[in-house]
Image (tube, coloured by chain):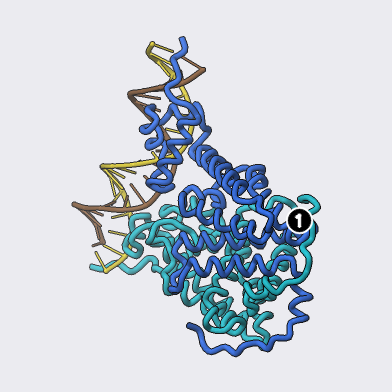
Chain colours: A blue, B cyan, C yellow, D brown
Amino acid sequence: MPTPDRTSLEEIIQAGRDILESDGLARLTMQAVADRVGVRAPSLYKRVASRDDLIGYIAEATVHDLTERLSAAVGGSDARADLTELARTFRAFAHERPASFRLIFAFGPEASRPSPASIVEASAPVLRVTAELVGPENALEAARLVTAWANGFVNMELSGAFNLGGDVNHAFEFGIAHLAATLGVPAFRRAARRSQPRRAARGVP
Amino acid sequence: MPTPDRTSLEEIIQAGRDILESDGLARLTMQAVADRVGVRAPSLYKRVASRDDLIGYIAEATVHDLTERLSAAVGGSDARADLTELARTFRAFAHERPASFRLIFAFGPEASRPSPASIVEASAPVLRVTAELVGPENALEAARLVTAWANGFVNMELSGAFNLGGDVNHAFEFGIAHLAATLGVPAFRRAARRSQPRRAARGVP
DNA sequence: ACCTGAACACCGTTCAAGT
DNA sequence: ACCTGAACACCGTTCAAGT
């Protein structure tokens, strides 16, 4: 005699996302999720294989949201402006949902990670823009340069690693301006062609 | 009547570092550490305040080692070569001790994080080099650009986020070459001065 | 002054028994 | 077919009792 469903996978994932953002990953316990959806903890195992599996679902959903935001951010006629907008959108997303964002590039066990396929999807917009900037033969390398920088910047920002003062927003704009400017110019040739004298160091601020 | 010490803080930290690298953070339990140093788990609390505190010591020791490596990597006469060497040294360190490396920029609880002072120390070498390249007024922003990129690159690499194929080593060299080339040239002016026609996109590889 | 066994609260997870 | 109480193994941590 079947009993009617008292919850669903979607509801469990949403409860997990809410708890994650409000209380942090450590407080995302099966008990807390069960309380929120109104069942006992063991019942969750009818819909997720494990806590790591649930975290994997949350990571996957987060990557999906990020992909939507990034896709909506591009499409202008200026590839450099698009790249800048992609970076700002990426950062804004991380600021809005820091705990979820961390999950995307977190290490944890295999089951807790987003699928490679979803990561591929998320990188499509930046690949399109870098292909425009540097041509398809270097699009992947350029996308990795920009993505690594954006990811590292936001990660350091969120973990409080930028503690030398200075304006972090300004540092972000400095970064994206330089990246947008340098892409499309072969690095080695330009470095060789440079004629400006190097400025002398006057100490570290 | 005092009993002779059966272990020490140094031994506990070293045991923690060994377990972390060989078995991962999840297996770094107080029990595992206690077994390795030859005491019972409760005895560890005479020397560390908590597991997070122990992780904090490990993170601190790792930052210290990284600082030594980075400091030894610079000092040539060419600032661009120094910057490249710093990035490669940073990446090599992360590859050698990935689990410890992650700890440096990990999020976790306050007690488990390395001290701000140690992070400041670790960034001294890159600040020295960027000051040479862009002058002291932009040294901090330039250091943040390079550090964010290097950190993000290695993080994505270690977490398996680079799954679109391509040569990851080549992408790293592409990145550092572009960063070394662009620093020292005001981004906005150069972008405005550019005369090269933009290449057309021919699809995403 | 350090070390230990015992205990506590809290996890993730399993499973037989209910409906 | 889903849900539950009870139980298990395993955590971090505390503390009174030993030496």
| Quadrant assignment, res A184 | bottom right
Q: Position of residue B67 (x, y in %)?
A: 53, 75
Asked whether residue B118 is in view, the answer is no
- Is B38 located above or below residue A47 in the figure? below
Q: What residue is rendered at 63% in x and 70% in y?
A: A178
- Is A182 located above or below residue A76 in the figure? below
Left or right relative to B78: residue B107: left
Asked whether residue B132 is in view, the answer is yes
Name the secondary structure under disc 1: loop
Q: How many marks?
A: 1
Residue on which disc 1 sits? B166
Q: Position of residue D10 (x, y in %)?
A: 44, 44
Q: What residue is rendered at 77% in x and 63% in y?
A: B198
Q: What residue is rendered at 58% in x and 64% in y?
A: B151
Q: Position of residue B166 (x, y in %)?
A: 76, 56
Mark 1 is surrounded, within 10 Å at the Cα level, by few (under 14), some (14 to 19) or many (20 or more) other residues, namely few
| Quadrant assignment, res A16 | top left
Q: Position of residue B28 (x, y in %)?
A: 47, 54
Disc 1: which chain? B
Q: Nearer the viewer, residue A11 or B108?
A: A11
Q: What residue is rendered at 58% in x and 77% in y?
A: B70
Left or right relative to A27: residue A91: right
Left or right relative to B93: residue A21: left
> Label 1 amino acid?
Gly
Q: Nearer the viewer, residue B202 or A28?
A: B202
| Quadrant assignment, res B197 | bottom right
Q: Nearer the viewer, residue B44 or A23?
A: A23
